[in-house]
Amino acid sequence: MGNKMIVPFGSQHVALPEPVRFVFETENEIITNVEVDVGYVHRGIEKACQTKIGYKQVAYVVPRICGLCSISHNMAYIIAIEKLLEFEAPKRAKYLRVLAHELDRIHSHLFAMAHVAEAAGYENLVMYLFRDRELVMECLELLTGNRVQFDYGCIGGVNRDLTPEVEKELRKKLKKLEERLFWFRDVYLNDYTLNLRWKGVGVIPKEMAEKYNAAGPVARGSGVRTDARAEFDALPYRELGFEMVVYEDGDIWARNMVRMDELLISMRMIWNVLDGLPEGNYKENVKGMPKGEAVCRWEAPRGELFYHVRGDGKQILTRMRVKTPTFSNIPVLKELFIGANYADVPAIIISFDPCLSCTAR
Amino acid sequence: MSIRKKSPWILHYNCGSCNGCDIEILACTGPKYDVERFGIINKGNPKQADILVVTGPVTKRTRARLLRLYMQMPEPKVVVAVGACACTGGVFRHMYNVENGVDRYIPVDVYVPGCAARPENILKGIALALEIWEKKTKDTIEIPTVIKKEYEKIVAKMLMHGQVVDRRKIIYDLVSKYIQRKLETPKCD
């Protein structure tokens, strides 16, 4: 017995930057049933890539699937196509790809952490995070020429070289950022309010994460060792000092700490790239048409991104399939809500860092 | 009215964009660009909003929502389309689930170009929207100011003569007279 109530959340809501709709059935503020609708942003990109866009232009259409992890989509597609064409990118291009991708990861994670802090009501921290995120955005703009949609990678390498002047500026800005990151880590570890709000809320046990096939920081926050970068050989992650971050707690706090520690690892990899950037070409001409089938697994900021490409020697691909990280996190999100308190809903949703434009495409 | 001018509230709706423009709008509220120094606050309630900021090429699912949000906003309202895909459809133009731009469904006042639109451009777009909003406000409050002056004259006269003032009746008479006068005068265009 109790007060039964149906609470709609979305599709337009202040806490959400994008349209998604949840319908919660609650009983005395405890959620008993959830319905999720993620299809608001479906545009039909996959279909367009198979029917009217040539395979070289697709590399600049797929980043528009998602603005936050645009470079992940771009590069995963490019690597899949390079596998088909049996081409290996020059070493300098590989290093520059890692540089751009890790910078993108830093900006995406800072954004996600700012959002979670906002859901906890910690406005100061949000503003600090946004201020320091601008440093990364400036770095990305220096490197690639744009703030959000970079279009940095191309089939055969990258579109721009790293000049010494840019490198000098990058070093200056990244040094400033690194100091701030250590300060943020201190806040996230030790702040009394944040610990009170986040510890023990929205707990995903390890078995549940494995059963529902969670990906990315959500899985790593629950102790599942999964990271595509550890088993990926098209880019030199291992020689740049990659390390997997795993926390066992499984709550909102643990997911945030995974993101926080990944920032520091990304920072380390960026320093290694800048120190040991090899000489040589940053772009090479590629000939031939894609024929056959190839897949690419890529670690986007939200988890594992999967590209499947099939061509038959013509300009237009016969099949292109994208599986995005948020898509695999939706079932566990739905399961997690049942039995949770309604007041925790915004914090839980945002701690997953959902990207609906990825999911619906 | 002057309070609204000093602090216009924004309603942001994503009609299927790639999040690029949305994160740039959020970056505008951050400390570097700081849109809040103009008194602009991002609010989720359409009934309290003055400016509607739309991103994305309008998918078939979000179309009805967009219209409903637009209808719920109070007059005068201004619409800003942010990003290439909100203006024309951008890269998504002629994809099967896309409606090619916001202006097919609601009137757009300011177009902000770019993929993704830069924060500086978004700020400029909102500043332009404020100007348009001010103009629209003047158009809509012209009627009350005329009546107000006449009303003050009549009330002053009645008070001088020591009569009892029925304010409601005076306003009713004035408004009905004003409307009749407006209806009689032929329109130029």
Image (cartoon, grey):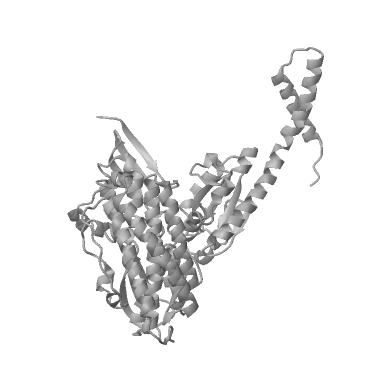
Residue occupying the point 38% across, 62% down: A179
Query: Relative to residue A48, is residue B181 drawn left or right?
Result: right
Q: Position of residue A282 (x, y in %)?
A: 43, 83
Pick the front one: A140 or A286: A140
Q: Quadrant of residue B157?
A: top right
Query: Relative to residue B155, is residue A109 drawn left or right?
Result: left
Residue A122 sits above or below residue A79 on the image: above
* Residue farthest toward the left in the current orientation of the protein: A207
Q: Position of residue A174 (x, y in %)?
A: 42, 67
Residue A121 sits above or below residue B182 on the image: below
Q: Position of residue B125 (x, y in %)?
A: 61, 56
Residue occupying the point 29% across, 43% down: A196
Q: Count numbered badges in the picture.
A: 0
Q: Position of residue A259 (x, y in %)?
A: 32, 59
- Residue A34 visible, this orientation: yes
Residue occupying the point 73% across, 28% down: B175
Query: Relative to residue A214, is residue B97 drawn left or right?
Result: right
- Residue A16 visible, this orientation: no
Query: Relative to residue A152, is residue A89 drawn left or right?
Result: left
Pick the front one: A333 or A118: A118
Q: Quadrant of the N terminus of chain B?
A: top right
Residue A176 sits above or below residue B68 on the image: below
